[in-house]
Image (cartoon, rainbow, N blue to C red):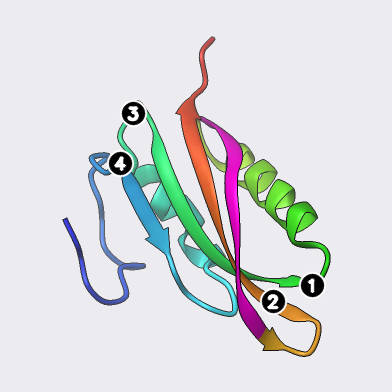
Amino acid sequence: TILEGDNRNHEFEAEFDRVNLGLLPSSEDGYALALHALKPEGGMLHVHGLASGGNEEEWSRNLAQTLEKMGSFSCSVVHIERVKWYAPHQRHIVVDIRASPVSC
């Protein structure tokens, strides 16, 4: 299901396998909503963001930790795509995050 447009004010059911957070310079406002939209068994988040050139891995690890603190998923970095330079020393990246349910 593709829901076009800005979905930050939409109330989602937990029914999605994948959520694309494609806002620049930051999609941080959508993190909680994206986690809530994932199925209880988890899924993939595709998070666009800006990282300092050379620090893409650190930015991605911090993103996974931030997402874990927000919900009931264990989050791990699956892939980092370096899209293009956005500004001097700022790289547009897309981080694929696997969100898996936390087992007690």
Front-most of residues 16 and 78: 78
- Residue 44 place in picture, x, y as percent: 42, 44
- Residue 91 place in picture, x, y as percent: 69, 76
Sequence order check, earlier mark of 3 and 4: 4
Alpha carbon of mark 1 to alpha carbon of mark 2: how far? 6 Å
Magenta-tinted stretch: 73-85
Alpha carbon of mark 2 to alpha carbon of mark 3: how far? 32 Å
Question: Which amino acid, by three-letter code, is at mark 4?
Answer: Asp
| Residue at position x 78%, y 90% in the image | 88
Sequence order check, earlier mark of 1 and 2: 1
Residues under numbered marks 1 and 2 in contact, where contact means CB atoms less than 8 Å apart: yes
Residues under numbered marks 2 and 3 in contact, where contact means CB atoms less than 8 Å apart: no
Task: Quadrant for the N terminus, please.
Answer: bottom left
* Element carrying mark 1: strand
* Badge nearest the viewer, 4 or 2: 2
Residue underneath mark 4: 17
Question: Which amino acid, by three-letter code, is at mark 3?
Answer: Pro
Residue underneath mark 1: 52
Question: Which amino acid, by three-letter code, is at mark 2?
Answer: Arg
Residue underneath mark 2: 91
How many C-alpha atoms fall within 10 Å of the one at disc 3: few (<14), some, or many (≥20)? some
Sequence order check, earlier mark of 2 and 3: 3
Could you say which disc has been placed on residue 40 in the image?
3
